[in-house]
Image (cartoon, rainbow, N blue to C red):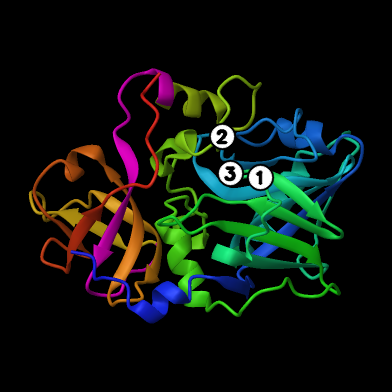
Amino acid sequence: MTPPLPLEATQALHGVVRLTRLGVIQVDGEDAAKFLHGQLTHDFALLGLSEARLAAFCSAKGRMQASFVGFKRSHDQILLICSRDLLPSTLKRLSMFVLRAKARLSDASDAFAIWGLAGSAVPAALPDAPWTQWRDNDASVVRLYPADGTARALWVVPATASAPTGEALSEDLWNWLDVKSAVATLSQPVFEAFVPQMLNYESVGGVNFKKGCYPGQEVVARSQFRGTLKRRAYLVHSPEPLAAGQEVFHSSDAEQPCGTVVQAAPHPGGGFDAIVSMQTSAAADGSLHAASASGPALSLLPLPYPLLDDI
């Protein structure tokens, strides 16, 4: 069972926090949107200035090498927010595909500050729908999926700009809210471990099945159209610490893991919550355990959004 939130934690789910584990890839040029449209899982060709995109960058085998929140700062400039530990390799591989496109890619992590906004710190002017963008002078504000009813957003500004208004929010609480949103951010421990549907990306706006080709597109499409998906992302609670890349076992099989921890954070009331990608059959019955079949028991938690039916 999930422990109840302490009163002080409930009251603390409002505020702002600098997100230093995230970095920025900047794409400039008249072909910036067209170039990214041909590389990522979502439609960037039709990306407007009031929108954002959740998207993945995949290998030729459809395995996710990075995930992004992307948005336009101007008509010829797009920022991609991703995990810092994947940024150098992702930037190098993306740059290999530029060829004759009029697009320049750079690591702009030091040029921008990324803040997380939660609860009352999220501006009232920001549209309610996830993956919408609103500009406040130099700040690009992107609505994220909520977590347990708590509104969340990214505030991206030049590094020299002032911090957003709001009480200080602890990084642990932000990380926990990030997990509770059940929208995973890929990091190095799970590099190339999943196709997008294994993280429910098709259900949270991370894949466009109507757009043209991109690396791994055939595998991603086949995973969706051939029938029932065999792996999904779930939320779990553990009384013991969990970490990205850790294996998950089902009580029926002590030898082969049934899933992998994607993202984890300490629960304010004790223990850890995590996003786990695992076989759908493992969620049906029996018990789940971390690290081994005799490891700490995991409790399944409800997802905060509906899964799209298989097409």
* CA distance separating discs 3 and 1: 8 Å
The magenta stretch is: 224-244
Name the image quarter holding residue 269.
bottom left
Quadrant the C terminus occupies: top left
Check the image and report above or below for 58 versus 6: above
* Residue kind at label 2, given as amino acid type: Ala
Q: Are marks 1 and 2 in contact (CB under 8 Å)?
A: no
Residue indicated by mark 3:
130
* CA distance separating discs 1 and 2: 36 Å
Residue 226 belongs to magenta span: yes
Q: Position of residue 55 (x, y in %)?
A: 60, 41
Q: Position of residue 1 (x, y in %)?
A: 18, 64
What residue lies at 56% left-to-right and 39% top-to-bottom?
Answer: 59
Residue indicated by mark 2:
60
Check the image and report above or below for 287 versus 103: below
The one nearer the camera, 257 or 5, is 5
* Residue kind at label 1, given as amino acid type: Pro
Give the class, few, some or many, for how many residues have Cα within 10 Å of label 1's Cα (few <14, many ≥20). Answer: some
The one nearer the camera, 9 or 40, is 9
Residue indicated by mark 1:
127
Q: Secondary structure at mark 2?
A: loop
Give the class, few, some or many, for how many residues have Cα within 10 Å of label 3's Cα (few <14, many ≥20). Answer: many
